[in-house]
């Protein structure tokens, strides 16, 4: 089981880590919330916890806890611009449905 | 799907990246650093849990300098190389320092007495900026350890009465320490921020700030969360140190003359005096001893010794109230700031004068740093700008010169900054394409009595009749007091601007003098303005009549022409030295004698316009 990150997204992660000044990488996970059940979590990582999986690709560390990994296994993370908006996008093969706003998804 | 941003760990909701900003109270005796942590502003302690960093630096040969409590021992062991109360040295020359402080246990490089004092230490010559930078560096390091990250910005507080060179040296010290200064904040303003946000008081508040080396009184009016500074007063060389000197003097007077190193004796005396002063805040009397000498000092005796100092502070309060035209009954709260306000003699005197117990519920040592921390958090962008209370004011009016050397005030004095004000002006002559602007500062009506700040020109105004062009002049003063003036012609968009620092080279004494002059000369200024205005009106009339005559002299019979000439001559003569009433009377007279001529010209113009038109057509128009 694994997740991946595009070169473009990895560059943005590296930049943000550098401007923050500290941190090991980013944590990708899910939490229960929103209208469709699950939402992604994207945070800086200061400490790797017991049970975390660490993937390294394109120069950045992606940290996922075991519980989240089953929901997002195979997810590709990208960085996109949509008009004035820009941010990270997840392509998750496990997601069966998304709510209208795209905040949350279900499996 | 929605685009995601990377969040801080543990952050439950979407939040902008929190940038680290701290507020620093760079004090004479002690310094503190505060930062916003999870909504409230906290004073950051060192690894031992102490909040106050003694503003003391001890320089050592071949080793890094000791700062804070590690340096304190050096005051006795190594007085020459241990520098304290260095804030008093900022922006001053050695000569000034020596007249103000009797006990200076340092070696100075006398050859540099005209400039910044140069203190000779084992680690080389140090100036006050370097020493202050060492203190700031220590505080920044403490903050970075507490907050676990590099600092993005700092707000540093300075006494309200610091002049430009003292402020500049504080900035220089910060730069030397590698800090990004968001702004310098006046200490009473910072105290008001701390109290205003926490206690939501309303009314008139006196901030009584007696620190280690500086004294400030500020009178603030608080209405619906917005502060206005009504008046300030103070003394850059009065503080807790002076109370120490009084006790040291008292001890020295009772000692037989000592022959050992004078530096050590002075420093030791000061330390004994300081300890005794602190003890007297808790006990009714204290025992002092020095070598084989010993005596006791009671609170009552101490009050007597320091009576002059205390009454100095009360006199300042009195002056500040008078400046704001308020009486003691109008004051709702007195906020005590600075460690020296712990002295019962001070608290009692303040309570007695204001007939009200002063507020002391925020630690008087911490209140300024807390306010600075709040401001730092806002300025770095962690809080929305509308939750922003900005409390500094523009000390003198800023304006522009108009026709006849008159001053049009654009930003009146005591306006809170930052501020933007704009006003429209127009051209004075037909076809005028250039307009020159003269930016002035002051309260007087005539340009010659104000301070000239800058001149600039707006070129490329499209030619139009006088009064048709619209030129928008905007004045903007930013949070640091920097003034930008821009002039823009609205139809073509042509623009010119200039930036100045209005406070450059102005100290509080000069500001007070300018204010006083404006009060003393209010009457003559008003007369001068009305004369100038009458002169402008007269000149416009004379020039209009000259124009008319050059076009339609044929409409003017000789005797009438003669009468007009006489009236013009009289008016021109009056322009030299007559009062405004006389000028107005002569303007009336000229209007009267030229009235028939104007009427005939009007008839002629109408007749020309109507020639060849049928009555029907004119009626239907």
Image (cartoon, grey):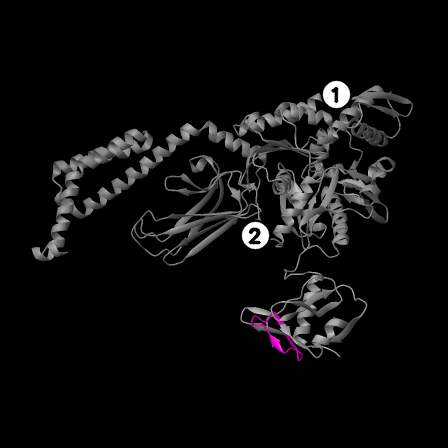
Quadrant holding the C terminus of chain B: bottom left
Chain letter belonging to callout 1 = B
Q: Is residue A93 above or below residue B117?
A: below
- Label 2 vs 1, first from the N-terminus: 1
Q: State the extent of the magenta-drawn residues as a range.
A: A90-104
The answer to whether marks 2 and 1 sit on the same chain is yes
The verdict on residue B410 being magenta is no
Secondary element under disc 1, as helix, strand or loop, is helix
Q: Residues within 10 Å of mark 1 (few under 14, many from 20)?
A: some
- Coordinates of residue B354 in the picture (x, y in percent): 61, 25
Q: Nearer the viewer, residue B424 or A80?
A: A80
Residue located beneath label 1 in the image: B305
Quadrant holding the N terminus of chain B: bottom right
Q: Nearer the viewer, residue B532 or B443?
A: B443
Q: Nearer the viewer, residue B337 or A45?
A: A45
Q: Residue furthest right?
A: B292
- Coordinates of residue B366 in the picture (x, y in percent): 71, 40
Residue located beneath label 2 in the image: B385
Q: CA distance from mark 2 to mark 1?
A: 49 Å
Q: Residue at x 14, y 39 (%)?
A: B596
Name the dominant secondary structure of the magenta segment: loop
């Amino acid at each position: 089981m694994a997740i991946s990150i595009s070169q473009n997204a990895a560059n943005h992660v590296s930049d943000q880590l550098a401007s923050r000044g500290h941190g090991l990488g980013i944590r990708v996970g899910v939490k229960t919330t929103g209208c469709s059940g699950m939402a992604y979590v994207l945070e800086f990582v200061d400490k790797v916890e017991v049970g975390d999986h660490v993937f390294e690709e394109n120069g950045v560390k992606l940290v996922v806890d075991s519980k989240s990994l089953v929901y997002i296994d195979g997810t590709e993370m990208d960085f996109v611009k949509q008009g004035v908006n820009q941010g990270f996008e997840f392509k998750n093969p496990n997601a069966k449905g998304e709510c209208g706003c795209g905040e949350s998804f279900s499996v | 799907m929605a685009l995601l941003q990377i969040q801080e760990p543990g952050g439950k909701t979407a939040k902008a990246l929190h940038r680290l900003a701290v507020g620093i109270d760079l004090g004479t005796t002690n310094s503190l650093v505060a930062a916003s942590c999870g909504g409230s502003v906290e004073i950051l302690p060192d690894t031992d849990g102490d909040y106050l960093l003694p503003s003391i630096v001890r320089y050592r040969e071949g080793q890094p300098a000791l700062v804070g409590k590690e340096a304190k021992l050096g005051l006795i062991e190594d007085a020459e190389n241990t520098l304290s109360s260095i804030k008093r040295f900022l922006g001053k020359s050695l000569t000034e320092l020596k007249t103000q402080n009797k006990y200076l246990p340092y070696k100075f490089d006398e050859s540099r007495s005209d400039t910044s004092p140069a203190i000779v230490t084992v680690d080389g010559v140090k100036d006050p900026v370097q020493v202050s930078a060492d203190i700031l560096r220590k505080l920044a390091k403490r903050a970075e350890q507490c907050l676990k990250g590099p600092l993005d910005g700092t707000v540093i507080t300075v006494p309200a009465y610091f002049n430009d060179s003292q402020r500049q040296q504080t900035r220089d010290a910060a730069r030397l320490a590698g800090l990004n200064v968001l702004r310098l904040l006046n200490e009473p303003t910072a105290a008001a921020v701390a109290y205003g946000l926490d206690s939501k008081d309303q009314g008139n508040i006196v901030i009584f700030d007696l620190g280690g080396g500086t004294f400030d009184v500020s009178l603030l009016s608080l209405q619906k969360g917005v502060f206005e500074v009504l008046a300030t007063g103070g003394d850059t060389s009065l503080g807790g140190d002076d109370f120490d000197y009084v006790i040291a003097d008292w001890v020295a007077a009772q000692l037989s003359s000592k022959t050992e190193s004078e530096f050590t004796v002075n420093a030791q005396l000061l330390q004994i005096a300081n300890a005794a002063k602190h003890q007297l805040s808790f006990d009714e009397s204290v025992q002092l001893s020095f070598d084989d000498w010993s005596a006791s000092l009671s609170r009552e005796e101490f009050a007597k010794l320091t009576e002059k100092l205390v009454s100095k502070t009360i006199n300042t309060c009195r002056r500040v109230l008078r400046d704001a035209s308020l009486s003691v009954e109008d004051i709702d709260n007195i906020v005590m700031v600075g460690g020296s306000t712990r002295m019962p003699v001070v608290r009692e005197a303040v309570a007695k004068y204001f007939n009200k117990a002063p507020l002391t519920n925020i630690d008087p040592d911490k209140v300024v740093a807390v306010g600075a921390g709040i401001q730092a958090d806002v300025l770095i962008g962690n809080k929305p700008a509308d939750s922003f209370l900005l409390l500094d004011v523009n000390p003198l009016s800023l304006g522009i010169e108009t026709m006849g050397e008159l001053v049009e005030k654009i930003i009146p004095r005591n306006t809170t900054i930052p501020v933007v004000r704009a006003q429209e002006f127009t051209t004075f002559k037909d076809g005028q394409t250039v307009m020159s602007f003269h930016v002035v500062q002051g309260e007087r009506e005539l340009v010659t009595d104000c301070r000239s700040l800058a001149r600039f020109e707006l070129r490329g105004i499209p030619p139009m009749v006088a009064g048709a062009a619209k030129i928008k002049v905007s004045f903007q003063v930013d949070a640091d007091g920097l003034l930008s003036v821009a002039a823009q012609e609205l139809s073509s968009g042509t623009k010119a601007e200039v930036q100045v620092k209005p406070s450059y080279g102005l100290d509080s004494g000069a500001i007070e003098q300018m204010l006083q002059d404006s009060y003393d000369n209010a009457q003559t200024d008003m007369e001068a303005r009305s004369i100038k205005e009458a002169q402008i009106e007269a000149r416009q009339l004379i020039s209009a009549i000259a124009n008319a005559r050059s076009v339609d002299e044929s409409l003017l019979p000789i005797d009438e022409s003669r009468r007009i000439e006489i009236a013009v001559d009289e008016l021109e003569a009056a322009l030299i030295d007559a009062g405004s009433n006389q000028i107005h009377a002569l303007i009336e007279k000229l209007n009267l004698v030229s009235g028939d001529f104007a009427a005939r010209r009007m008839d002629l113009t109408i007749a020309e316009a109507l020639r060849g038109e049928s009555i029907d057509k004119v009626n239907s128009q």
